Image: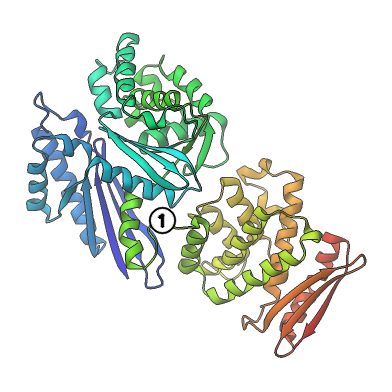
Amino acid sequence: MQRIAIIDIGSNSARLVITQMYKSGAYNMVYNQKETLRLSQKINTNGELTETAFTDTLECMNSFASMCELFHANKIIAVATAAIRNAPNGKALVLKVKEATGITLEIISGKAEAYMSYLGVINTLDIKDAIIFDLGGGSTEIILVQNRKMVNSISLPIGCVNLTATFSSKNKITPATYTKMRKAIAAQLNLVPWIKATGLPLVGVGGTARTVGKVEQKRVKYFTSKIHNYQFAIQNFKNTFKQLLTTSVAERKQLPGLSSERADIIIAGAAIIKALADFSKAKKMIISGCGLREGMFLSYYAPKNKQPLITEDILADSCANASKLYTPDSEHSRHVTNLALAMYDSWKPLHKLNDRWRQLLQTAALLHDIGITINYYSHARHSAYMIENAKLFGLTHKEQVLTAIIAGWHNGISRSYLRNKQYKELLTEVDLKRLGIAALLLALDESLDYSQTNQISELSATISKKTAVLNLTAAVIPTIELHQLKQQLRWFNKAFGLPLVIKTHK
């Protein structure tokens, strides 16, 4: 077991994230701390970091060092970005940090920052072609992704904090200063011709992007507060931005989704996003809750576990991680999953579900027992809750809900589970019917390994006009499994209007 501390000293805020790595290869976050530093505002006329910047950074790093010690972090990886990178006395601050805390703070280049952000996004979002932007306090990294590969990147010296400091007076941005701000942003974007008019979706990383996403979620009364992989039309953002321009800082502090600490810098940050959208002709925006820190962790974790730096299947990898963390009997879960997929494929003409539902069933099958970690009794409901809230990448928010319900219903359909759920109104009768079928298939396959001894090695399923047939191959008669299967016959008949005949073979 090992604990890795990732420290990111940005131009607006500083973050400490401690992640635990287990012998199984699984990992999860155990601590997170954020401090607002505003280093981009603590610059003198010579471009140097002020004494206040030094004092605040050292105080923050001492706090981080103490937490790393308390949480027994085995390794600390610390980086500094634009504000310290661009300051002539940035290296002097790094030396002060080393003397005071023993932590080596590495000043990374804009290219390195862009690459780490790319790693954090590409391993957690199901995107093929996109423009990633990591909008910070003192810089904006722009990455062009084609076929999941980073083909170009640049770090521009514009961010929400330094633009605000340059173009606002007494916390106000007038129409005249906004015009100057737009021209300054446009001048920087002209250095990035390779994103012009691509029409690719924008993937936003960083606090400003997350804030924009949260404001949009509140505006439409979105059913969940999850921000990672939240998607919306650029035009909706533009409409919101137009309204923001007419508000005071005090009024923005009252806007749902907008934290008070960002009320003064959101205009500058949102102006960069709007300019990016106009320049690239993007129609859609996707918010990523993962970026630089996740990329830094993965660049350490992947080699240690002999895994590729860029995963081929983000859903499979995140599902495997959750399974290693919480599943008491992973062999049983894998066996149930294999049986479920074999049954699904054999009975396609019967259930008439598409390949996306196959993925949802596969995910639900792998994680259907994780609720036992909480309590065996009602573990299906516990599993559903855990799946609903797990870090599963590669699913939309609605798909993750559907997966949770499949697992939650594997002991029988219970619409009472949905009674107080915010997403209840999103589910159509067609959705509910499909959920019932997927849950039935999972229930059948859970029954096929009820003793958790892998007695049934193979299955094949066929259908005729009058019956559905399940052929099971087992070395000995699987008495317990056959008994449990009988409990599902009525449910099967009700779902498909056919009796289920079970045949065993050696």
Residue at image mark 1: 310
Frontmost residue, 336 versus 384: 336
Question: In the figure, 107 relative to 348: above or below?
Answer: above
Amino acid type of the residue that numbered disc 1 sits on in the rendered structure: Ile
Frontmost residue, 72 versus 398: 398
Q: Identify the residue at image location x=74%, y=57%.
A: 436
Q: Identify the residue at image location x=40%, y=16%.
A: 247
Position in image of residue 272 (x %, y %): 36, 26
Q: Identify the residue at image location x=49%, y=29%.
A: 282
Position in image of residue 239 (x %, y %): 50, 20
Question: In the figure, 373 relative to 198: above or below?
Answer: below
Q: Identify the residue at image location x=45%, y=67%.
A: 325
**Furthest-right residue in this view:** 466
Question: In the figure, 302 relative to 216: above or below?
Answer: below
Position in image of residue 411 (x %, y %): 69, 66
Instruction: Identify the element where label 1 is drawn.
Output: loop
Residue 169 shows in this picture: yes
Horizontal side of 330 relative to 461 (left or right) equals left
